[in-house]
Amino acid sequence: MVRKRRSAGRPRKPVIDRERILGAGLALLEARGLEGTTMRALARRLRVDPMALYHYFPDRDAVLRAAAERVYAGLSPRPARGWRGRLEALAVAYVRLLGRSGELLRYLTHDAQAASGPSVRFAALFHAGIAPLQLPPRAARVAHDAFVDFLHGFALAGPGARARLRAELAVLLAGIAALSRRRRARAR
């Protein structure tokens, strides 16, 4: 019996890498929920030894936090004019993103540490959108929180509710505009 000798040179390409793990982790989370997302289940999905995953991530939460960062990094609303247009574009992009990742949203709402990076990304986009309104910090925080809660509700409600997004968003944007008008009236 003749054995094939492995030729000298570069090692073969790794079977897994960070990006494959993150993609498989998100797919597993969406398919099985948080309880079904374990390092062993992830290794089975990737067809690797479970210990191989620990070379890249210390635990499941590290995988899911990195996956959330990756997903939110892709949050890119279309360019729009005016603060209303920018917030509407952000809302549409965010609900679309979360529509593909409902379980990820559920995970982030239960883990403040995991949500910190994605929250910073979203907040930056939101505050850039409302900058022309020059809201005081407290009013900006209230507007941000109402906007986020509103969008999370739409994202979790499913595709039927998403069809009403723009119409119902108009009511919330009118409330944010009222905050700005009230600020200007007090300044006089």
Image: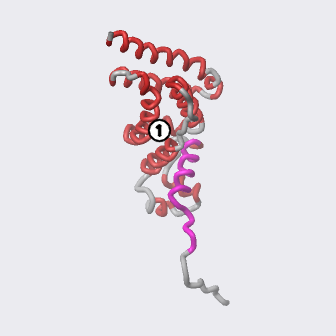
On the image, the x and y values in percent for residue 173 come to 50, 18
Q: Is residue 10 left or right of residue 59?
A: right
User: Is 96 inside the magenta-drawn segment?
Assistant: no
Up-down: is 18 above or below 137? below
Quadrant housing residue 154: top right
Residue bearing the label numbered 1: 107
On the image, the x and y values in percent for residue 40 come to 51, 55
Main secondary structure of the magenta stretch = helix
44 or 14, which lies in front?
14
Which span of residues is magenta-colored?
12-30
- In the picture as drawn, the residue positioned furthest to the front comes out as 188
Type of the residue with mark 1: Tyr
On the image, the x and y values in percent for residue 105 come to 50, 36
**Label 1: few (<14), some (14–19) or many (≥20) C-alpha neighbours in 10 Å:** many
Element type where label 1 sits in the image: helix
Q: Residue at x 42, y 30 (%)?
A: 127
Up-down: is 109 above or below 3? above
Q: Residue at x 46, y 49 (%)?
A: 66
The C terminus, quarter of image: top left
119 or 187, which lies in front?
187
On the image, the x and y values in percent for residue 9 come to 55, 81
Q: How many numbered marks have been drawn onto this rendered protein structure?
A: 1
